[in-house]
Image (cartoon, rainbow, N blue to C red):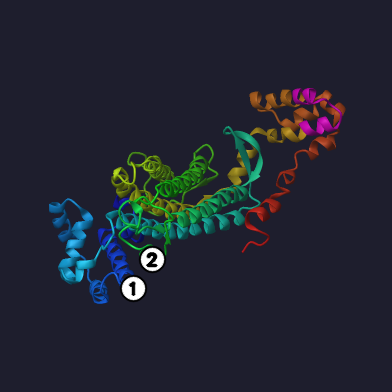
Amino acid sequence: MIPRYARPEMTAIWEPATKFRIWYEIEAHACDAQADLGVIPRENAEAVWKAKDVEFDVARIDEIEAVTKHDVIAFLTHLAEIIGNDAARFVHQGMTSSDVLDTTLNIQLVRAADILLVDLDKVLAALKQRAYEHKDTVRIGRSHGIHAEPTTMGLTFARFYAEMDRNRNRLEKARWEIATGAISGAVGTFANIDPAVEEHVCAKLGLRPEPISTQVIPRDRHAMFFATLGVIASSIENIAIEIRHMQRTEVLEAEEFFSKGQKGSSAMPHKRNPVLTENLTGLARLVRMTVIPAMENVALWHERDISHSSVERGIGPDATVTLDFALNRLAGVIEKLVVYPETMRENMDKFKGLVMSQRVLLALTQAGVSREDAYRLVQRNAMKVWERGADFREELLADDEVRAALSEADINEKFDLGYHTKHVDTIFARVFGSQKD
């Protein structure tokens, strides 16, 4: 996580001050629940809340931790300095460090997910707008990077919309799965703390009680969360790669917006490079880099070890901050993307009707020609287009074997572009519903 690829709202979730504030709220709510159960005096629970408007001294906590070598104890010591030792006497009653650490991490991930869901909505809105704008903008579809058959730019945007919509659904589920808390004490048996305390704390903090924890909240939840972020990152790269392809000089069907005063190269003043989408490809790699460590965190020793802790201190902020930045950058790229319909048409016509080969193949089979012979007839005329720039339709019209099965009108009809776009509305209805808005 570096400032260049970070936005303040997401970064704030991972600031030490935010973490300590959550720790404090967990402890204070736990004290309330303990007082309700008669385990601790009510006045002690109320005294803890005297620190609710206090800004915890991060430097002081670090100073204490340098001696204790334990972050939670350092925080509790600092809290006692604020509210007094007598008031703090029952703080952390029956709890263990993981109760605080794991519940806090899940709160942070839930908050991060909420921001990412808003980010995805921005991307979806941009994709939908551009899809309708270019619903009927015909461009060539490519398979293996080679001209295939006509499609539309709107369908390209719609395809990415559907993918990101699936990602949004995945993230909602991942958010739900990670939204648990545990206040179950050492080894998770509730021996020294009533389960009612966990229920109270989770309710106050918008979580569900973890059904069973071993002192540690099961890390399969986190693995699923980070895997979902990795899938979203891959989808970002999927879109970025398409835009980077379209901006190639030999293609130039679309390009990133090039602002006034922007420079493309330190050496070549003519350059307009797809720097934003190249950046998105790189950021996607960073997010996906966190998935494997999250998977490896699932296997912990017995009721607890802390091999996952150092990993999560890194991947938690890194994955969410980077993905937040990438999604916002992607939304901006899509909103401002410059599209060139004329170039799309020129590219499609580069091989003079060659992309209509399947229609001719099918017409020949429907006219009684075997598929093997039909393929041979179409391919031999197609190769003339590839090899010497011939006109595909003219070659077909001059081929006696083809003409024995198809009339001139039959052949000409197979070059109607409308044939390839006739179901665009059907696809749009499947993706966006029956209405645009």
User: Depth check: 417 or 215 in front?
Assistant: 215
- Residue at horizontal 80%, vertical 30%? 397
Residue 106 location, x and y as percent?
A: 38, 56
Horizontal side of residue 44 vs 212, given as left or right:
left
Question: Residue 196, which numbered label?
Answer: 2
Q: Amino acid at mark 1?
A: Asp
- Asked if the residues shown at circle 2 and circle 1 are in contact, with their CB atoms under 8 angstroms apart, the answer is yes
Structural crowding at the residue carrying mark 1, measured as other residues with C-alpha within 10 Å and reported as few (<14), some (14–19) or many (≥20): some
Q: Is residue 366 magenta?
A: yes
Residue 309 location, x and y as percent?
A: 30, 47
Q: Amino acid at mark 2?
A: Ala
345 w.r.t. 351: above or below: below
248 w.r.t. 382: above or below: below
Q: Quadrant of the C terminus?
A: bottom right
Asked where in the image residue 411 lies, by quadrant, the reply is top right
- Residue at horizontal 59%, vertical 54%? 131
250 w.r.t. 132: above or below: above
- Residue at horizontal 49%, vertical 38%? 249
Q: CA distance from mark 2 to mark 1?
A: 10 Å
Which stretch appears magenta? 361-376
Residue 113 location, x and y as percent?
A: 43, 57
Asked where in the image residue 356 lies, by quadrant, the reply is top right
Give the structural element (helix, strand or loop) at label 1.
helix
Horizontal side of residue 401 vs 292, given as left or right:
right
User: Depth check: 204 or 251 in front?
Assistant: 204
Give the main secondary structure, helix, strand or loop, of the magenta stretch: helix
The residue indicated by pointer 1 is 36
